[in-house]
Amino acid sequence: MSSPISSEHIQQYQAIHRNTRYGVSGYKFVPHIQLCVLELRPATLLDYGCGQTDMTQAVQDFGLELHRYDPAIPAISTLAINRADLVVNTDVLEHIPEEGIEPYLKHIASLTTHALFSISTCLAQEILPNGQNAHCSVKEPEEWLQIIRQHFPQSELLKTSRRNTALILTWKSKARPLIELVDEHYVLRRRAEKLSIKRILRRLIGKK
């Protein structure tokens, strides 16, 4: 099946990928993905809309088959499989134009019953070559949940301390409490790192 996204929209991202390192936010969800893999024991994992993220190292110890797909990157613009035991979709849906969301989710639902979605719920800093904001579909977490439930009825919205983020699993996960705990730990660690950097900068400025 060809991409459910219009060729004109894909071309905008092809231009960005040619010039910058873009689409690497998937790394922020490696612990979440690892917990999903431990629960589901999938034979195949598909990173759908992966951008320039490559999670090969993160999941290599689980002995599963990893596939990457992104229509805006020529080397991985062809989807090589028809089914996947687990699909990861990190920070992609907000980039899909409103009219493309339905066929996009329909395509993912044709590939799997188990998917992890992370979705930004605010405008992006990145501006496309055509002048539009890269996040062209901005919705609240509950709105995204209802949209995704049309294709994955068992979907659940996870608790997260991340600002402007919706985390959604498409199955009743027994690992949900652990995933939410890992997410909270990640947010706290990132905040601590930023605080430490600010303190260092203040000290350096004070010495001057």
Image: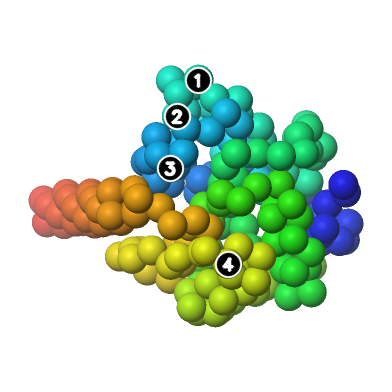
**Classed neighbour count for the residue bearing mark 3: other residues with Cα under 10 Å, few (<14), some (14–19), many (≥20):** many
The answer to whether 82 is drawn above or below residue 65 in the figure is below
Question: Which badge, 4 or 1, is on the more N-terminal residue?
Answer: 1
- 160 lies left or right of 95: left
Q: Which residue is mark 3?
A: 36
Find out whether the residues at labels 4 and 2 contact each other: C-beta distance under 8 Å: no
Q: Amino acid at mark 4?
A: Pro
Q: Residue at x 43, y 67 (%)?
A: 157
Which of pointers 4 and 3 indicates the residue nearer the eye?
A: 4
Which label number is shown at residue 63? 1
Question: Which badge, 4 or 2, is on the more N-terminal residue?
Answer: 2
The answer to whether 119 is drawn above or below residue 10 in the figure is below
Q: Secondary structure at mark 1?
A: loop
Which residue occupies the foreground of this view, 5 or 190?
A: 5
Which label number is shown at residue 153? 4
User: Count of labels shown?
Assistant: 4
Q: Residue at x 57, y 42 (%)?
A: 86
Which label number is shown at residue 180? none
Q: Amino acid at mark 2?
A: Ala
